[in-house]
Amino acid sequence: MEKKNIDWANLGFGYQETDKRFVANYKDGAWDEGALVSDAKVVINECAGVLQYAQTCFEGMKAYTTEDGHIVTFRPDLNAQRMEDTCKRLEMPVFPKERFVQAVVDTVAANEAYVPPYGSGATLYIRPYMFASSAVIGVKPADEYQFRVFTTPVGPYFKGGVKPLTIKVSDFDRAAPHGTGHIKAGLNYAMSLHAIVTAHAEGYDENMYLDAATRTNVEETGGANFLFVTKDNKVVTPKSDSILPSITRRSLMVVAKDYLGLEVEEREIPFEEVKEFAECGLCGTAAVISPVGKIVDHGNEIAFPSGMSQMGPVTQKLYDTLTGIQMGRIEAPAGWIHVIK
């Protein structure tokens, strides 16, 4: 298929409407067959549950053109499972995992002309999401829901190259114990907006949230998991029931252990220990790994030995290996790469 006339090398990380999106509706206790549609508009009742009580969730994924010309996506089964876990917590109907993956495949295939070519630095971002569509005035779950998947071509998260971030220890809490921090609910992100706007106004790139119960352990940022490297090259990530289980972070831990031969550990990380690490990064779908150069705790600076000019050496190897797997340059573990075309 002929590609769209897009300046792939200069794409930003933003929304651009594509030709098709998948839509399925839940009514009378069952999902319909769903279909690919051309209309990008969503029409719902003014009293829809999503508008009144924020009953909504989403996932974030990407499709890539590999070195040998295939269009693939990365570990979609894990996104499907995470959305299932989210739906159960929010009293929303589960969209079956097999149908989730097929909807992603069909939507990407229908928008093949928007999948950036290999080597362009761009990818096709995929957004599966679900929301309560029927009217709800009492505080209760809705009766009807809509599941949708849209795609949009995006450029690299960092235009002009990766530069280490400066982040602050936030005075706000991201998620409470026994709350919704472990699921990908829209309400979690709404609650983080004031904190990130405040951080930006103060000159910081991101927030570090500590655990809400004791405010002594590292948790995550508003949209990414932390990854640390010790001075003897052990890769360590925080463990908590209120952290979103990042698919990128879980994949990087496998890469560290099985591809790079590094020791890995998932455990509670006291904030007091952060100053002892050699490298720090934020991991997620958008950028894979964003290096952190400095953390500021109410005026007290922690500067990592990796510096403010580039990724640390271990972080760079992790990034290069995982992106190599995603782009087909490095053989992937079984089941990680789902070939679409």
Image (tube, rainbow, N blue to C red):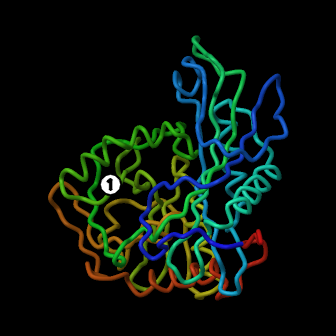
Please tell me which residue is depicted at 56% across the width and 81% down the height of the picture: 263
The answer to whether 6 appears left or right of 72 in the picture is left
Q: Which of 153 and 166 is in front in this view?
A: 153
Please tell me which residue is depicted at 31% across the width and 49% down the height of the picture: 196
Please tell me which residue is depicted at 78% across the width and 44% down the height of the picture: 35
Q: What residue did someone put label 1 on? A: 207
Please tell me which residue is depicted at 52% across the width and 84% down the height of the picture: 320
The image shows residue 133 at horizontal and vertical percentages of 64, 26
Q: Kindly give the residue lying farthest to the top in the view shown.
A: 138
- Location of residue 116 (image quadrant): bottom right
Vertical position of residue 93 compared to residue 167: above or below: above
The answer to whether 19 appears left or right of 314 in the picture is right
Image quarter in which the C terminus is found: bottom right
Tag 1: amino acid: Asn
Q: Is mark 1 on a helix, strand or loop?
A: strand
Vertical position of residue 199 compared to residue 300: above or below: above
Q: How many numbered marks does the figure carry?
A: 1
Q: How crowded is mark 1: few (under 14 residues within 10 Å), some or many (20 or more)?
A: many
Image quarter in which the N terminus is found: bottom right
Q: Which of 121 and 36 is in front in this view?
A: 36
The image shows residue 122 at horizontal and vertical percentages of 52, 72
The image shows residue 90 at horizontal and vertical percentages of 63, 33
Q: Which of 6 and 288 is in front in this view?
A: 6
The image shows residue 242 at horizontal and vertical percentages of 52, 46
Q: Kindly give the residue lying farthest to the left in the view shown.
A: 299
- Location of residue 153 (image quadrant): bottom right
